[in-house]
Image (tube, helix red, strand yellow):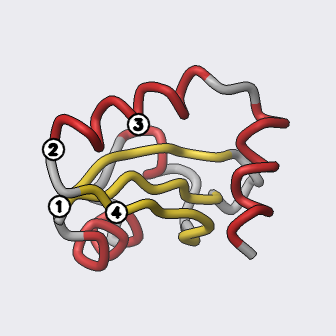
Amino acid sequence: MNYVYILQCIDGTLYTGYTNDLNRRIQVHNSGKGAKYTRGRLPVKLVYSEEFNTKNEALKREYAIKLMKRKRKLELINSMK
């Protein structure tokens, strides 16, 4: 499966990414070996994820989420709760 996810960093900022192994990717982020953005903002917490059948679908959704303003991302996160 393919996933788009949003992490909340320790400083409250949000990071959006794509992976095909969600649990492993979160562990990589929290080990300090993930994206440069999250390295200085540890630990990170998974606050949102979506599952897709294809990588292409997931990457399109990741791009759409990255274009969203913070307020819209928070609405998306809250809709999952």
Answer yes or no: do the residues labelled 2 and 4 have beta carbons within 8 Å?
A: no
Label 4 to label 3: alpha-carbon separation = 11 Å
Residue behind mark 2:
55
Mark closest to the chain's N terminus, 4 or 1: 1
Q: Nearer the observer, disc 4 or disc 1?
A: 4
Image check: 18 left or right of 10? left
- Tell me the CA gap for discs 1 and 3: 13 Å
Q: Position of residue 55 (x, y in %)?
A: 15, 44
Circle 4 sits in a helix, a strand or a loop, which is it?
Answer: strand
Nearest the camera: 7 or 37?
7
Q: Which residue matches tag 4?
A: 51
Residue plotted at (48% across, 44% down):
16
Q: For the C terminus, give its image quadrant.
A: bottom right
Image quadrant occupied by the N terminus: bottom left
Q: As rendered, which of 37 and 40 lies closer to the eye? A: 37
Q: Quick one: label 4, few (<14), some, or many (20+) residues within 10 Å?
A: some
Label annotation for residue 20 = 1
Q: For the residues labelled 1 and 2, say whether their Cβ atoms are less than 8 Å apart.
A: yes
Give how far across and how far down residue 30 sits, in percent.
41, 70
Mark-to-mark CA distance, 3 and 2: 10 Å
CA distance separating discs 2 and 4: 10 Å
Q: Which residue is mark 3?
A: 62
Pointer 4 with pointer 1, Cβ within 8 A: no
Q: Amino acid at mark 4?
A: Glu
Asked which secondary structure carries label 2, the reply is helix
Numbered disc 3: secondary structure: helix
The amino acid marked with disc number 3 is Glu
The residue that appears at 48% across and 49% down in the rendered structure is 38
Looking at the image, is 11 positioned above or below residue 51?
A: above
Instruction: Work out whether mark 3 precedes mark 2 in sequence or the reverse, and give the earlier one.
Output: 2
**Mark 1 surroundings within 10 Å by alpha-carbon count, few (fewer than 14), some (14 through 19), many (20 or more):** some
